[in-house]
Image (cartoon, rainbow, N blue to C red):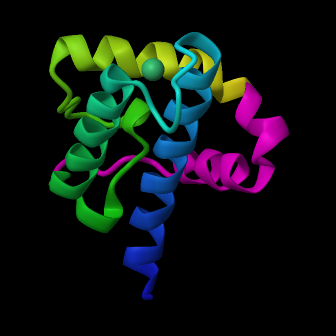
Amino acid sequence: MNRVEARLARERRTISVMIGMYCRAHHQPVSGLCPACAELEAYALLRIEKCPFGWRKPTCAKCPIHCYKPEMRERVRQVMRYAGPRMLLRHPLLAALHLLDGWRAPPQRP
Ligand SMILES: [Zn+2]
């Protein structure tokens, strides 16, 4: 796996882990994710895949584009607000790498 793929694979894993933590705490899914969170995850993964910045993708919080539609953006914000602080305890490496990604200045255009 090259650097680009590794970076994007980590983004996908980070968002999946965060949605999983949020769903388990709020929706008590029988297994995996509840239907609403599965939809949110699929949407988030698609946004990452389609991101016009490609491997230079800033973390979504810093992105100048904000490609999420408003409803999904609000839902993902709730997930981040809940799972963000918990990531540091449960997945410190992923959380630290995501923070590092966030420190890089976002590119101004794709
Ligand atoms: Zn859920």
Q: Which is the main secondary structure of the residues drawn in magenta?
A: helix
From the viewer's perspective, is residue 75 above or below residue 38? above
Q: Is residue 69 visible?
A: yes
| Horizontal and vertical percent position of residue 56 | 33, 62
Q: Is residue 39 left or right of residue 62?
A: left
From the viewer's perspective, is residue 99 above or below residue 3? above
| Horizontal and vertical percent position of residue 37 | 38, 26
| Horizontal and vertical percent position of residue 78 | 48, 13
Q: Is residue 96 left or right of residue 6?
A: right
The tally of labels here is 0
The residue sitting at the front extreme is 30
Residue beneath the point at 38% across and 76% down: 4
Q: Is residue 83 left or right of residue 10?
A: right
Image quarter hosting the C terminus: bottom left
Residue beneath the point at 48% across and 44% down: 16
Res 9 → quadrant: bottom left
Residue beneath the point at 23% across and 37% down: 43
The residue sitting at the bottom extreme is 1
Which stretch did the figure color magenta?
A: 86-110
